[in-house]
Image (tube, rainbow, N blue to C red):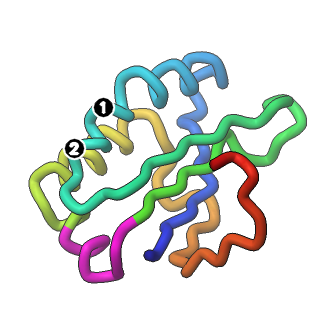
């Protein structure tokens, strides 16, 4: 399992509250349609005024081929087109990682 992790930055004309509302309620349903997506996590800062970024995105896929296919798909293209309407795409750091869970007491 691989994970894409990205720190996201909102468009300057949006307040943090407007950004969060759009990300959680309008964009997320679009993004969830990407093929091969196994898990989709959005995280918002507890104190946005003191945070360098507006949120953290985590997308899980079986492997890097599945990730590429998802973004190359029609649903992936729709997702990215919508992201450009409220995010400064590519502004924050991004990594593709292999996750190793050291402890998970939530299960």
Return the residue nearer the eye: 69 or 7.
69
Q: Is residue 93 above or below residue 85?
A: below
Residue 34 falls inside the magenta stretch? no
Question: Do callouts 2 and 1 mark residues in contact (Cβ within 8 Å)?
Answer: yes
Residue 57: x, y in percent? Answer: 55, 51
As drawn, the label of residue 33 is 2
Image point 31% across, 43% down: which residue? Answer: 31
Q: Is residue 94 above or below residue 78?
A: below
Residue 68 sits in quarter: bottom left
Return the residue nearer the eye: 62 or 70.
62
Magenta-colored segment: predominant secondary structure: helix
Residue bearing the label numbered 1:
29
- Which segment did they paint magenta? 61-69
Image point 44% across, 75% down: which residue? Answer: 1
Residue 46: x, y in percent? Answer: 82, 31
Specify few, some or many for label 2: CA neighbours under 10 Å numbering under 14, 14-19, or 20 or more: some
As drawn, the label of residue 9 is none
């Amino acid at each position: 399992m691989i994970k894409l992790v990205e720190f996201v930055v909102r468009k300057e004309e949006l307040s943090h509250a407007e950004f969060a509302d759009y990300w959680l309620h309008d964009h997320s349903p679009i993004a969830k349609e990407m093929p091969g997506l196994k898990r989709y996590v959005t995280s918002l800062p507890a104190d946005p005024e003191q945070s360098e970024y507006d949120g953290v995105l985590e997308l899980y896929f079986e492997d890097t081929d599945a990730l590429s296919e998802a973004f190359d798909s029609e649903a992936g293209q729709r997702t990215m087109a919508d992201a450009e309407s409220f995010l400064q795409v590519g502004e924050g750091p991004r990594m593709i990682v292999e996750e190793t869970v050291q402890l998970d007491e939530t299960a």
